[in-house]
Image: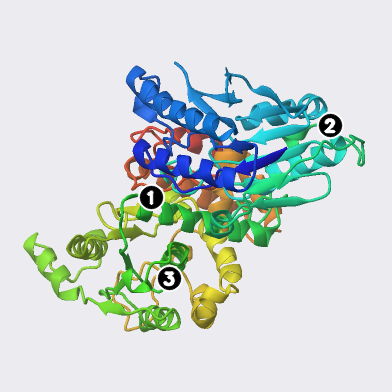
Amino acid sequence: MKIFIANFEVKPMNISFNISKALSQLDLCYENGADTIVFPKGFLFGAESGILKNTEWVKNEYNKNIDTIFEKAAELGINVICDIATDTDLKSTFFDGTKISMTDKCTINDMNIFCANNSNILFKNMKKLAKENDVIIVNWLEKTVAGQKDLWIKAMSTASKIYGTVFVLNTAGIGYTSHPDFFAAMCGVITSNEIIVATDYRSVRNCENCFEIDKDERTVTVKDTNDYMALTQFDVFYNQNPLIPTNVNIKRYCLDLFDMQSASLANRLKNIDCKKVVLNLSGGLDSTLALLVCVNAFDMLGIDKSGIHTVTMPGFGTSETTKGLAYDLCKGLELSIQLIDIKKSCTEALLSIDHDSVTPDVTFENVQARMRTLNALNLANRINALMIGTGDLSEEALGFSTYGGDHLSSYNVNCCVSKSVIRTMLKYIVQEDLFKNAKQAVYDVINIPVSPELVPHGGKILQKTEEILAPYKLIDFYIYCLTVTKIPPQDIVNKAYFVFERQFTREYITEKLKLFYKKFSVGQFKRSCAPECADITHVSLLGNKTYYPSDASVDIFLQQLQ
């Protein structure tokens, strides 16, 4: 059996474009002498159909184009494994040139084939499926988060070593929608002897398509596992950086997360035919990571980096340190940077509402954030660009952003990544050749204190966020306990006291936890209308994914801490 993996870029909900690409894959399959072609699930939609799901006319349009593929495959003598639209969902289909079988199972060249278009079904029933089938086709349309592909591949490799089963992977990815669910591609084969699977954006685009699969003698070569589903789950473990799973290599996790951030932006730019972005570069952690994501995404797409428009907008509290770092980053990445001094426009805005333009209150601070966003959005409009948001998960949890200011963007690349994880990621990302000339500037960013820089300071960093709120490692620990383990508030205090090896007193931990709960509750209205983004980590507070009342009382938490 010679199998061809149909790997091509699609456009969400553009069936005419996607069918033309699919038909060209049949020609490539024929030219390579393959007898079977595998398409990823949802390849004609490039997305979940959402509001159009279960719509009769959409189903008919989908299947009409699938029939076109079957007709051409019959002419070329090629077996087709793909999906077909039913009244409820997309279902696996096998076409052998004369007969269409809507089933998860088929037989090709005396080999038993199973189509796994759902990860839960595969891993919950792995022993039975691996024993009964020579080949398992993995062509699902699954929401993917960072680190998950490694666990899936590890579980499949284990089964292949035990039962001799061959896994053929062709999952959704390139060009698929990037909001809110991210569909990451895996292309290749897993046998008992080797793993030939592309999983990152660049390698998937250039992966090997054609594989010869023989029916080998099935022998048990390693000890069987009791629970394949457990192999695919992230380890729950309390430590000082719990938002990085402990059962995935930390470097691979960080680079996978970075690749997914970049790929989601690349998909968005390609799908809306946009070749420019605008980024407000502060010289801090978040905007630094966002800048590297933009550079990587443009490199993925082969777009000229001149389309990355960086802007630095010093205000009343901007320090010489961060301003200098913004310039150093752009110099290292060979990017130009535009300076827009917002102090005059902010003063005018304050005076227009009868503010004295001097008192450093919340209005004084927020007008600067809003002015930066206003300028960035206006610039994006003028040059037909996407304005990139930089707010991270830690800030999302606390509502630590200005509503109508840095809360807004056209597309946010950081919102599922915490401050502690960003610090960890940057150390690995700057080792990549693409960023070698910006390495020192990135290290300098990592080593300065986090600050909103919104009040006058005499050129120095006066405001330090971790002194105002709490150390971010503690905030991120609270996020983990709230969203993953969901333990009671008093248990969080106890866990934090021991995990951080008594760096903080119980009283301090309790005080900061109360503050966390208060800010989490009052900040929900910002999460409920956050900008579009890709949900790419196992911990998320996106308003469209995690419901919490915007007018909820914090009392339920505080009572537990009395």
Q: Is residue 430 left or right of residue 193?
A: left
Query: Which amino acid, mark 2?
Result: Asn
Q: CA distance from mark 3 to mark 2?
A: 46 Å
Question: Disc 3 designates what residue?
Answer: 284
Quarter of the image that includes the N terminus: top right
Q: Residue at x 62, y 49 (%)?
A: 209
Q: Residue at x 65, y 48 (%)?
A: 210
User: Residue flagged by tag 1: what amino acid is it?
Assistant: Gly
* Mark 1 vs mark 3, CA separation in Å: 18 Å
In this rendered view, identify the residue nearer to me: 147 or 318: 147
**Is 548 positioned to the left or the right of 152 in the image?**
left
Tell me the quarter of the picture where residue 461 sits: bottom left
Q: Mark 2 highlights which residue? A: 226
Q: Residues within 10 Å of mark 1 (few under 14, many from 20)?
A: many
Residue marked by disc 1: 399
Left or right side of 35 for 271 = left
If you read the primary sequence from the N terminus, does the residue marked by circle 1 or circle 3 appear first? 3
